[in-house]
Amino acid sequence: MYNNRISTAARYNLLTADIQKNEANYNRITQQLASGKKITSISDDPIAAVNIINTNRQLGQIETFNNNVAMGMKELDTLDDLMDLAGSYLSSAWDKAAQANNGTYGVSSLKALKTEIDEITKTMVDLANTEFNGNYMFAGANTKLLPYEMTDDGKILYTGTPHDNPDYVRQTEVADGVFEVINTTGDVVFGWYKDENDYSGVMGALKVLSNSIQEVIDAKEAKDPTAETAGYDKMRSTMDMFQQSLNEITTEQTKFGGVYNRLEMTESTLETNNENLTGYLSQIQEVDIAKAVSDWYQAQYAYQASLQVAAQTMNMSLLNYI
């Protein structure tokens, strides 16, 4: 015959296990209320814990991408402002070239005009040497080296990465595996001037204009009509050069305007993704306070009840000895 009675040791083990289970549940809910988090260790809910880790990783990536987008937009804003200024100074020089080409200016007026052109040239070089966030904006990849130098013999040299070298590109990651180019080079925006046979862009146009004005001045003073005509011919050639230079600057502005628009759309997408992931994280991680308080009272009652049952069952009460 089997003995159906449960031994004292077995009963003690069952009651102890029940107390430990209720105590653990009570402590877990107490910790949730204190931290405001449903999951305080991976053992609470391994699947949810993994989801929280992955979601936090994605949110960290979004923060990095947001910072990259914000910095890229600031740099592109600055780039656009500089090219606006370059276009403005170019237009001013273009107007002065038209004035000089009318053939009515005397020597003193031409000298004054040349001085203005030379000042515009210096300003244009300063623009081309602008820094943003510690980097020279038009230097290509050589962002720590001054991209433009005016030499004593009248040259305007570009020492940055040339545009035909693909290594000039600086790009920023704005989404997972998505990169945007946020820089250009000085040689494509401003050009250079080495000599009468090697020049380009607005720098070349300004120097050719200045030199041709000087040639006309010298010819007038020497009363040499042939040289004067040649000077005016060279001066007139700069009109097309200024037009081409303005077109090049406008092309770059348009290109980077498109990049800026894409960054704005990316910023909006990142913001939406951040809101969605934050909401999801809150759903799986944050405690519903009202429900947690109710659960806490129930867990407390269950824990106290298990202690009372154990005391009565195991004859632990002092009343049994009175």
Image: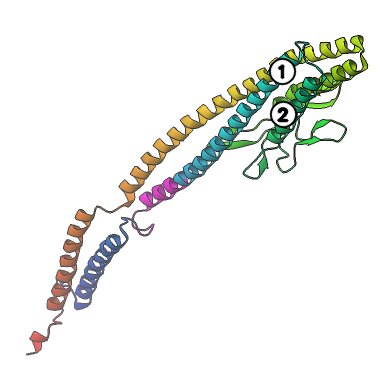
Viewed as shown, does residue 44 lie left or right of 76? left
Q: Quadrant of the C terminus?
A: bottom left
Q: Quadrant of the N terminus?
A: bottom left
Q: Main secondary structure of the magenta part?
A: helix
Residue 255: percent from left, percent from top: 60, 23
Q: Are marks 1 and 2 in contact (CB under 8 Å)?
A: no
Q: CA distance from mark 1 to mark 2?
A: 13 Å
Furthest residue in direction left, as rendered: 322
User: Residue 116 sits in which quadrant?
Assistant: top right
* Picture layout, residue 105 above or below residue 195: above
* Residue sitting at x 29%, y 60%: 32
Asked if residue 164 shows in the view, the reply is no
Viewed as shown, does residue 306 lie left or right of 322? right
Mark 1 vs 2, N-terminal side: 2
Residue 129: percent from left, percent from top: 71, 37
Residue 165: percent from left, percent from top: 75, 29
Asked if residue 18 shows in the view, the reply is yes
Identify residue for label 2.
Answer: 120
Q: What's under tag 1, amino acid-wise?
A: Phe
Q: Nearer the viewer, mark 1 or mark 2?
A: 2
User: Residue 297 sits in which quadrant?
Assistant: bottom left
Identify residue for label 1.
Answer: 242
Q: Secondary structure at mark 1?
A: helix
* Picture layout, residue 98 above or below residue 117: above
Mark 1, other Cα within 10 Å: few <14 / some 14–19 / many ≥20: many
- Provide the residue span drawn in magenta: 40-57
Find out whether residue 179 is within the magenta segment. no
* Residue sitting at x 67%, y 42%: 135
Q: Secondary structure at mark 2?
A: helix
* Picture layout, residue 22 above or below residue 212: below
Q: What's under tag 2, amino acid-wise?
A: Ile
Residue 142: percent from left, percent from top: 73, 39
